[in-house]
Image: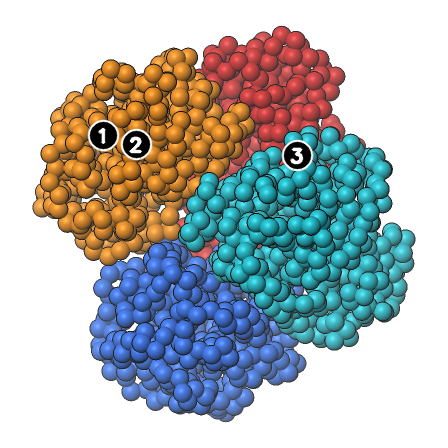
Chain colours: A cyan, B red, C blue, D orange
């Protein structure tokens, strides 16, 4: 049975992930993401209204025209978690394939939201949900299994396609976290077991492969939040936090320690409402009493209430950790909301800048404006959701794959993954493959 | 006769320069500049229509309310050259003082342009021009002399106020260039002579005091341009250059070597037309046949002509070296001009990024968009217009001032100037003064 | 009663701290430190044998000749904690003053060790120990109090000199840690009380005043160590850790989690034995069963035992976190010890590089050599012992000093402290003083 | 006729270059270099006495054992220029091949010097010299041509192996300099002609492929030296310069402008004497009256003469631009030579730091020690000898090779070359080859 891996997108950038695996005549697609950094270079782009070919031209979504050369039928589209670089192109591309979308419940819900805003293309793929640890049969020979991992969003899994020749494991966007704040620890036993059963190919992320050591557990971030909040217990002015809206574990920590120090947390901003709302509806977290406001008017009302009752009573958790021009924190920085910042107010970035000169410029501008109003700023109260170099080493050691095909980075960084693989006995071109968008490799 | 130096602006930033010197009852003001970086943090600010107090509040112009405590009459306002951080607040502040503006002819002309756009305040100060090497009498005891220096704009001088107690030399924005491309070399003999006559106080720029060595001569930049242009002699595609519109020496080099390699230079963009137009009208350079276009429609026409006759026949020299969102090169990057970039076109930045995360973000975005259209980019074909650390050392050695009062930087960087001064025998607090905006020192 | 602060050393560098406070005719000296970075520029310097004047000439110890101009008698020499930049010059300078050395017990013990190695000068000052919270009478009007703080070594205090005019608080080398791993949390109540009683002058460290936010608690470092060690629980090869030998809290965490994952910790290296040995003898920590080896031969024996019994049974904690050429880890990197590194062994730096190109070069070389032997490296498992910018803000807010005199940095960085102080209403030259080595200020 | 390229060394680092080309049964070897950065990690290594296998083990020289699998006879060993990363392993490896060494006269002379110091292996390969523009016949079908290029040493060429299938061009260590200071400009016409005749494969350097634009001509460096020296014309103290000893063009500029400002240049240091001595003997430059001193005693004598006659009469040009511990400038910094530095002496680095933390640490230490003696330092009076990104673009455009095989960098940086090649229509794995040390590719 011939098996092929097709690198559709995300092999020359961090973003717009899409990989297809053909097993005989059946094809499985992993992820259909968008690369917002490419889109945001342009002014006033409304992606909802754009044709996929224009977005492909811009470099914003995977160029899936390469799929027409693949001899097989797509049987499933599997987004591994709900970040936009993994699901953001589904509304543009999925309709071309007569295949269901299969994802964990939280991811499935985010896919539903994502396709609802689409205005150019129709969408009638079915969306099915499946839990980590479960398996779905594709045909007599092929099954897909979801393995629990940890990332900076709930519901992250890595899928394994089981074939007669061994498993193909698609391991993007994960870390090896033994003490996560929500969800189960990574399923190391299953990963080691897979290694014993036989892994034909492993497609790892290469995002931070060059970093020494391991990414700390989310529990360490939780401890950082606790430490910071407890030291601000006596602070009687305003206090505002921002983080990734989809990072429900982090938001949970912010909420809990806010309450510990006597502040009522409220979530402000469209994405805050969206992600936390879904997380609560799906019982991923329990947030019964936390106000969530996504629309301008309701946000303004909530802020006015804060101003009346006292800024020292509240912790607004807002969007804007990258200095995005239209996010809440940036609007607060521009003094265009009812929340009035003043000397000594604290603003906490529970996030780091996603490295790019544009983000750095925007964050700088937002911070500058906040400081001009007297805010005191805390940055980097954060740990990453991606693996450090040593976690890659362990994963390779556990899975013992016959082939490795690093993804989710430029060729330059992915070649550092190849360096690691060669240290462990692989050989570029033989069993360590450095593909580019549009390339494929037969195994 | 008591003498006082008042640090009005530019003593906590690079920008919004303003220093006053009181000699007995007469006061001389040096520079009235704007700090655009503070203004541009905000959206849609129209400085022409704003009140000075709002601009002061924003940190955008010097807070000259401190001048009301100065016991004396302002007798002259002396902008040392035509950059906006030295003349940009004249339209907002000068009308409060019953005193003429005295500047070199090129600077005077730029001041006239600057005050014309003002919409909030009236302006009836007289503007007088005076050449480097000339002297004006303020009263029986006090005269002001202009000493020729070199900076990245024509007409730069440093003024010396001669008093019975010695001279006060105001030395911002200069370099020690023995082989400038336009204008005379710096007048070292006169500087040494001043040192012998006796300098009471020297107020130097501290912009780059921490940099090793000397800033190369503009002749070195000229050689860089020549080298680059000559290597592109056979290039038969588009070629576009950008630099500071007021940097007439650099523009001269670009023009000359463009012609050497068979390309017709044209200047595009509002500031390009403004500065080069004035420079030509005032016979600072001779640009008889160079097209200059500042208005949208005439720029578009010129670009269409270029597209018709062939991009390989022309060198457009355009605004946008910092990635400013509305400048010509940024518009070209966004493909919103008639000039169509294509694979292999060359874009030359004869400038460096003025360090700030915002500039870096904007430049990055412009470069990215240019590259997406196939442009090949050359950066840093440039030398600075400010002194390196060793030039500061020489200047101090020549002038032998009794007091030094570094300006034009944050306190942190100015304290590096103090370090240099202390190496040379000065002592902070005694004869090396680290002032802040609003401070003054009696000498 | 006239009060004067004399900036003897550490006002142009991080290192060689020494400050004197004269209250009427009595003088108290805080710290007498060494600046090893200056010493190590030279080859083969044996400080033990050198005359103080030669070390002063080199810039290695404070130039205390300025003390001869101070009209008063030294009544006490108070080292605030046991780091060498605070006690390292005692053996060279203290003998000139007829005054006791007063310190917390751990610091006192380290001073005793330090003066024992001296070969040039005699030493007969008495050494007295006093706990945090205690007070000593200097004369009828003046008392000295020790206030408990947290730093990266046990026994750190900040002293307050109580005078009729208010207290002078000397606040170097501390952080505001509410959840330390050993010792009591910082005594915030007492600091606020001091603010109410009246503080005449505060002399803070400025080491990291420019950093945003707060330094995390040592408890966060402990959580990092736990997280890392637990993820290495299944690792069956060698594992080596390094940290500051005097950082007993960190060593405690390393020891504890080593045991949790089934490894026997041993301390190797001269300073490891020295600091941990003293800490144990003084009951600062309880380390009954931990082997400590400081001499070459005993270290070699211990390592041989490790090699025989299995590297997977042990965690050697060794010197060499900065890549110091003669430290244990560097010797291991050079393969000149019995401990044989091999593919997959883990080396953990529970420290960060003290920023300097020389340290960076040495650390790079050590890491490179370790990697060439197959070691996998973890860096920055660490939090700082110094305050971040926001802790400075809080301290000023609590103490409300009439004057601030930042120390322990270059003038450039200390001027950032002045920026902070000016935001809070101080004014440079009036009540915020930017002194240099050798300066003094009368309050 | 089957043709194969074997990547022996320099495909995972900048250093230890060695590439073999097999054409049918004949093999040509290009370069046999050493990677000193690997050697210098260790203490007290004496390479002259070491066996090649030990050096291979260390990663210091190419692992040429892979050559035993190549089916053919080595017919020529061609070092492309005299830098050690290209010739430094000849004494260790060449004796295994029964083949002459063919090089330009200057390179040939340096090879002779290099093999003379060898103490472990014998050497009896013949050394033949051949000028740029000349051709040598290998067999009926194969000839080798030397094409003139410019690099930071005289005598640099790039060889082309002409075969019935087209040329193989080995293009390491070069820049496209139209106005060199010594030697002829790069032979662009011949390169274009080769492109028209047909190039089967091109093996370019990738050293700086990621840098924008073009490396300036050596003429620009010359202009920088002139500008700096002329501004120091009136300086009446000491003045010392350092640069790469093999950079004869740069030394020529230093010599010439030293004389222009009335200083007698002398060359001090073992390598200074070696390279300049050879250059003069071979009539590459004309240095009749310049003193060159390589041995300790003669250097000391020369320095004493300088001290007697006046430092202001001389310009010593010395070794030590990277802060190498035993080089002349470092010894001067340590004050262990008769040349006494004093306040205001000038030290000019006509070189940049070769990027590595170890070099940065050593240079920092040397500069620090120089400054402590009062020296004022000028850095980066330099332009590179390697191509910028745009020169790579032009070269590809001229040569139009069927295959590209980037060398002389890590895989990460070489993959940036692949990016460039893909922009120009190549495809990794098809005609753009990313080899690693030990790999080969059949064309």
Q: Are marks 3 and 2 in contact (CB under 8 Å)?
A: no
Q: Which residue is at a point 13% across and 29% down the rendered structure image? A: D126
What residue sits 35% from the left and 29% below the top? D4
Q: Nearer the viewer, residue A440 or D144?
A: A440
- C10 horizontally vs D73: left or right: right
Relative image position of residue D74 (x, y in whole percent): 23, 30
Residue B107 visible within the image: no
Measured in 3D between alpha carbons, the distance from the residue under mark 3 to the one under mark 1, in whole angstroms, is 47 Å
Q: Residues within 10 Å of mark 3 (few under 14, many from 20)?
A: few
- Tag 1: Cα neighbours inside 10 Å, few (<14), some, or many (≥20)? many
For the residue pair B126 and C226, the one nearer the viewer reads as C226
Does C291 sit left or right of A247 as displayed? left
Q: Nearer the viewer, residue A164 or C272?
A: A164
Which residue position holds label 2?
Answer: D20
Residue A173 appears at what percent x and percent y? 63, 53
Please state which of the two labelled residues, at mark 3 or mark 1, is closer to the viewer: 3
Contact, mark 1 vs mark 2 (Cβ under 8 Å): yes
**Residue wearing tag 1:** D74
Report the front residue among C362 and C141.
C362
Q: Secondary structure at mark 3?
A: loop
Quadrant position of residue A262:
bottom right
Res. C331 in view? yes
Mark 1, secondary structure of its residue: strand
Q: Which residue is mark 3?
A: A71
Distance from label 3 to label 2 (Cα)? 41 Å
Residues indicated by labels 3 and 2 sit on the same polypeptide chain: no
Residue C55, placed above or below residue B92:
below
Q: Chain of mark 2?
A: D
What residue appears at the point 63 percent right and 41 percent down from the top-left corner?
Answer: A24
Residue A117 occupies quadrant: top right
């Amino acid at each position: 049975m011939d098996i092929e891996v097709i690198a559709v997108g995300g092999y020359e950038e961090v973003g717009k992930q899409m990989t297809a695996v053909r097993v005989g005549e059946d094809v499985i697609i992993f992820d259909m993401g968008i690369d917002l950094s490419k889109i945001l270079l342009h002014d006033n782009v409304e992606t909802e209204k754009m044709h996929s070919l224009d977005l492909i031209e811009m470099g914003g979504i995977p160029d899936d025209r390469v799929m027409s050369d693949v001899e097989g039928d797509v049987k499933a589209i599997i987004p591994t978690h709900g970040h936009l670089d993994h699901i953001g192109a589904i509304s543009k591309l999925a309709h071309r394939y007569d295949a269901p979308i299969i994802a964990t419940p939280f991811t499935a819900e985010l896919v539903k939201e994502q396709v609802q805003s689409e205005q150019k293309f129709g969408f009638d793929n079915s969306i099915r949900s499946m839990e980590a640890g479960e398996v779905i049969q594709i045909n007599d020979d092929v099954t897909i299994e979801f393995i629990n991992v940890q990332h900076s969003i709930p519901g992250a899994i890595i899928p394994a396609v089981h074939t007669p020749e061994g498993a193909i494991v698609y391991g993007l966007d994960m870390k090896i976290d033994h003490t996560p704040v929500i969800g189960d620890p990574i399923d190391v036993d299953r990963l080691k077991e897979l290694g014993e059963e036989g892994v034909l190919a492993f497609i790892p992320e290469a995002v931070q492969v060059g970093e020494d050591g391991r990414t700390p557990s989310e529990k360490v971030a939780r401890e950082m939040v606790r430490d910071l909040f407890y030291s601000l217990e006596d602070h009687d002015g305003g206090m505002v936090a921002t983080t990734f809206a989809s990072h429900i574990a982090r938001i949970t920590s912010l909420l809990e320690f806010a309450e510990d120090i006597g502040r009522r947390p409220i979530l402000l901003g469209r994405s805050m409402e969206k992600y936390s709302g879904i997380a609560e509806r799906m019982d991923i977290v329990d947030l019964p009493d936390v106000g969530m406001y996504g629309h301008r008017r309701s946000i303004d009302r909530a802020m006015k209430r804060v101003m009346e009752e006292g800024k020292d009573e509240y912790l607004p958790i807002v969007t804007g950790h990258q200095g995005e021009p239209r996010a809440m924190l940036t609007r607060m920085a521009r003094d265009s909301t009812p929340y009035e910042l003043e000397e000594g107010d604290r603003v906490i970035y529970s996030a780091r800048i996603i490295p790019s000169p544009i983000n750095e410029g925007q964050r700088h501008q937002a911070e500058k404006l906040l400081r001009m109003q007297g805010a005191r700023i805390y940055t980097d109260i954060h740990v990453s959701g991606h693996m450090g170099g040593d976690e890659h080493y362990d994963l390779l050691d556990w899975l013992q794959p016959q082939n490795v095909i690093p993804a989710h980075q430029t060729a330059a960084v992915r070649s550092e993954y190849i360096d690691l693989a060669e240290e462990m006995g692989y050989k570029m071109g033989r069993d360590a493959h450095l593909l580019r968008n549009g390339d494929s490799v037969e195994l």
